[in-house]
Image (cartoon, grey):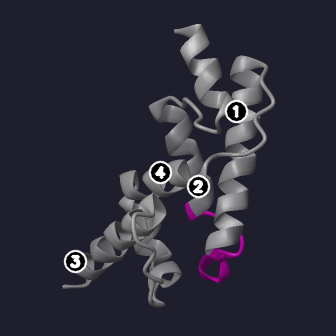
Amino acid sequence: SESTSTTLLHVGLPTLTKKEEKQIVTNLLDHPKQEQLTLDEALSFVCQLTTEIIKENFHYDMSCVQIEWFYDFLLNHSEIILKYSHWFNKDIELVKDDPIYLKQCQLKNMIENQKK
């Protein structure tokens, strides 16, 4: 599976353990900017943490994570979305067939459902 991992890293899809994911979640929730943190800043932050982990584990310099991966990460860790729900307060522009758009809608729905 070594080659599979490297291929995934090459396209910006990091392979992280549950523990490593949890570490990133914690760091994001404890971010010094707290609610002032923007979605773009969060992406950069997660990207930085992830690439550091990947470098340590695989000795591979990953340039950044794919935006799809980042959204999946958010979808898998609802506690991030609940804390930073303001990221999805504004209306999301409709982009037909855009996987990112679908993920944003899912996240928005998650937030709506939590508020009920």
Asked if 106 appears above or below 20 in the picture, the reply is: below
Residue 80 shown left or right of residue 13 in the figure: left
Query: Which numbered disc, 1 or 2, marks the residue closer to the eye?
Result: 2
Q: Nearer the viewer, mark 1 or mark 4?
A: 4
Location of mark 4 (residue): 73
Q: Considering the numbered disc 2 on the image, is that residue within a helix, a strand or a loop?
A: helix
Query: What residue does disc 1 label?
Result: 53
Q: Which residue was labeled with disc 3? A: 113
- What residue occupies the far bottom of the structure in this picture? 90
Q: Is residue 59 left or right of residue 114?
A: right
Dot 4: element = helix
Circle nearer the N terminus (1, 4)? 1
User: In the rendered view, does 22 fall on the left or right side of 40?
Assistant: left
Tell me the amino acid under the disc marked 4. Phe
Assess whether residue 113 is covered by the magenta stretch: no
Q: Amino acid at mark 3?
A: Asn
Q: Is residue 33 magenta?
A: yes
Question: 11 and 112: which one is in front?
Answer: 11
Q: Are marks 1 and 4 in contact (CB under 8 Å)?
A: no
Residue stretch rendered in magenta on the structure: 29-38
Badge nearest the viewer, 3 or 2: 2
The residues tagged by marks 3 and 4 sit, at their Cα atoms, a distance apart of 19 Å
> Which residue corresponds to mark 2?
67
Magenta segment, principal secondary structure? Answer: loop
Position of residue 19 measured from the top left corner of the image (x, y, whole percent): 50, 33
Q: Quadrant of residue 15?
A: top right
